[in-house]
Image (tube, rainbow, N blue to C red):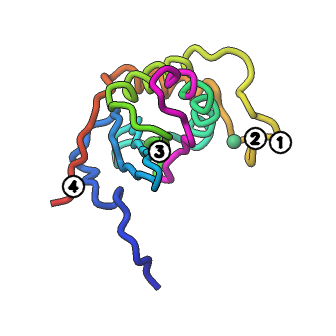
Amino acid sequence: MRPRTRVESFDLDHTKVRAPYVRLAGRKEGPRGDVISKWDLRLVQPNRAEIPTAPLHTIEHLLAGYLRDALEGTGAEVIDASPMGCRTGFYLTLLGEPDAEAVRIALVEALRGVTLHEGEIPGCAPERCGNWRDHSLPGAQAWARQVLGDEVIVQETIPLS
Ligand code: ZN
């Protein structure tokens, strides 16, 4: 069996992008005109690095709050921010379609939140998380600092030729 549907991200040339970046990965308009936008938040260079599961998981828990905070005032609302299986970044799904620069600024601000976070990891408890032992706040902060050491850019989609 094979899936019938083509998937956008498999047509992105992952060898030609330059991380860290934000990229508009897709948009959908509902029958009443509401727009959902999907963003590729690439933290590390594909096929050159990958974030280990514990730091990635902690970044996920922290971005859940810090991205929502950072996008306040853009008119967009976070539906979801989830790590990619390749562990090089996150997909961010928004109700609304802010411009890429606003998403870029929000990502930088949210990652700064990760580096400055104090106290407990939000949601890090067996009742609140599916693998609560697999977390690392120092790891998350080190990776976020490393990402912010480079300029986060707006990346255009480069299709496979
Ligand atoms: Zn979790």
Residue 116: quarter of image: top right
**For numbered disc 3, what is the local secondary structure?**
strand
Quadrant into which the C terminus falls: bottom left
| Category of crowding for the residue at label 1, using alpha-carbon neighbours closer than 10 angstroms: few (below 14), some (14–19), many (at least 20) | few
* Residue 49 part of the magenta segment: no
Residue 132 is marked as 2
Q: Which residue is mark 1?
A: 126
Q: Which residue is mark 3?
A: 91
Query: Which mark lies nearer to you, 3 or 2?
Result: 3
The answer to whether the residue labelled 1 contacts the one labelled 2, judged by CB atoms less than 8 Å apart, is: yes
Which badge, 4 or 2, is on the more N-terminal residue? 2
Residue at 75% from the left image edge and 41% from the top image edge: 132
Figure quadrant, ligand 1: top right
Query: Which mark lies nearer to you, 1 or 3?
Result: 3
In the drawing, does residue 88 fall left or right of residue 127? Answer: left
Q: Amino acid at mark 2?
A: Trp
Tally of numbered discs: 4
- The segment highlighted magenta reads 68-85
| Category of crowding for the residue at label 2, using alpha-carbon neighbours closer than 10 angstroms: few (below 14), some (14–19), many (at least 20) | some
Query: Which mark lies nearer to you, 1 or 4?
Result: 4
Whether ligand 1 has any atom under 8 Å from the Cβ at mark 2 is answered as yes
Marks 1/3: CA distance?
25 Å
Q: Position of residue 33 (x, y in %)?
A: 43, 47
Q: Amino acid at mark 4?
A: Pro
Residue at 34% from the left image edge and 32% from the top image edge: 20
| Category of crowding for the residue at label 3, using alpha-carbon neighbours closer than 10 angstroms: few (below 14), some (14–19), many (at least 20) | some
Q: Amino acid at mark 1?
A: Pro
Which badge, 1 or 3, is on the more N-terminal residue? 3
Q: Position of residue 42 (x, y in %)?
A: 39, 39
Which badge, 1 or 4, is on the more N-terminal residue? 1
Q: Amino acid at mark 3?
A: Tyr
Q: Is residue 98 above or below residue 14?
A: above
